[in-house]
Image (cartoon, rainbow, N blue to C red):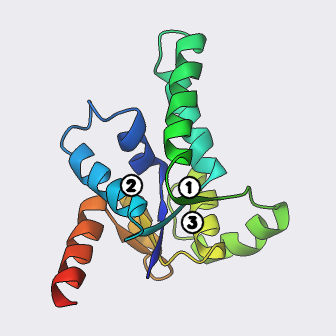
Amino acid sequence: MKQYYLDTSVLLVYTLTSGADADRYPHVQQLFDQIQQGMIKATTSFYALHEVYLFALDHAPDIEIGGNFGKKAIQAILSTKMYVTPLLTRIERKIHARLFQSLSDASDLPHVISAKLWGCTGIIAYDEHFRSVTDILEYKTPQEVLELEMLGASKG
């Protein structure tokens, strides 16, 4: 079974932006249903959890409300059957950053390094710039992964 890294863009749709991303939410909810059923193996990182929390703080009317939204979002993520990778060491980051020089957004470097180090074969995201690293990690949207899973199930 393939193991996928879930990027912040997917975690946000699952937790904090489901209303604003109404067209994406059904696919993300179905993806998480399959994760819960053990049909898809998923991983994320403390980097992604941190970004979800910061998003909540940045988009709430005050810090207390943002903190509560962020906390609830992280609790929802942690209650799933998803593995959470630790922060990278300085050496891990330095050594593996060379693999991903084609990545245009340096802030996503910890995500791809974590995905690679923890055995993920691909990244599920809504950030197109991950396409630049498909020679190392495949890039899929939640809908694409669901379509692959359905195709695989119909063959099996």
- Amino acid type of the residue tagged 3 in the rendering: Val
| x then y, percent, for residue 129 | 41, 60
Q: How far apart are marks 3 and 2 (CA)?
A: 12 Å
Dot 3: element: helix
Dot 2: element: loop
Say few, some or many: other residues with alpha carbon within 10 Å of mark 2 (under 14 / 14 to 19 / 20 or more).
Answer: some
According to the image, label 2 marks what residue? 127
Residue nearest the observer in this picture, 5 or 42: 42
Evaluate if marks 3 and 1 touch, with contact meaning CB atoms under 8 Å apart.
Answer: yes
For the point 46% across and 83% down, the residue is 135
Q: How far apart are marks 3 and 1 (CA)?
A: 7 Å
Q: In the rendered view, does 90 fall on the left or right side of 50? A: right
- Amino acid type of the residue tagged 1 in the rendering: Asp
According to the image, label 1 marks what residue? 108
Q: Is tag 2's residue or tag 1's residue first in the polypeptide sequence?
A: 1
Q: In which quarter of the image is residue 12?
A: top left
For the point 39% across and 57% down, the residue is 125
According to the image, label 3 marks what residue? 112
For the point 22% across and 47% down, the residue is 26
Measured along the vertical axis of the image, is residue 16 above or below residue 103?
Answer: above
Q: In which quarter of the image is residue 138?
A: bottom left
Measured along the vertical axis of the image, is residue 29 above or below residue 42?
Answer: above
Dot 1: element: helix
